[in-house]
Amino acid sequence: MVEAFMLIQTEVGRAEVVAKQLAALPGVVSAEYVTGPYDVVVRVGADTLADLKATVVPNVQQVTGITRTLTCPIANGAPL
């Protein structure tokens, strides 16, 4: 399994709602709203990096209220 952290910025006041919506998506391992330069941190996973890029990441990015994402593949798992 390949996993990544997604750092997400949302519209003002939408972090909690976005995190709850993200938690229900397939491929999302966890979703937390946080303070700092990003509003939500999501851990996502898929069988391959190609699956992660083709399905999971785009599904996350389509959630209403998200303004920007940064995807950081986890390097200590399967080779990238």
Image: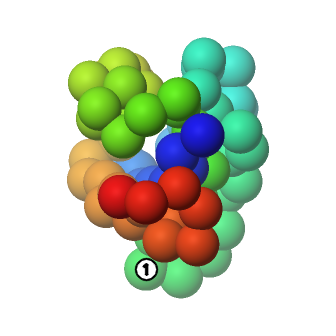
- Classify 70 as above or below 67: below
The answer to whether residue 39 of the structure is visible from this angle is: no
Residue toward you, 38 or 12: 38
In the rendered structure, which amino acid carries the disc numbered 1? Pro
- Classify 76 as above or below 62: below
For disc 1, the marked residue is: 37
Residue toward you, 76 or 34: 76
- The x, y position of residue 52, in whole percent, is 39, 34
Task: From the viewer's perspective, tell me whether residue 68 is left or right of residue 33.
Answer: left
Task: From the viewer's perspective, tell me whether residue 28 is left or right of residue 4.
Answer: right
* Residue at image point 43% right, 79% down: 37
Q: Quadrant of the N terminus?
A: top right
- The x, y position of residue 44, in whole percent, is 57, 42
**Which of the 4 image quadrants contains residue 80?**
bottom left
* Residue at image point 59% right, 62% down: 77
The answer to whether residue 29 of the structure is visible from this angle is: yes
Residue toward you, 12 or 25: 25
SS category of the residue bearing label 1? loop
- The x, y position of residue 58, in whole percent, is 29, 27
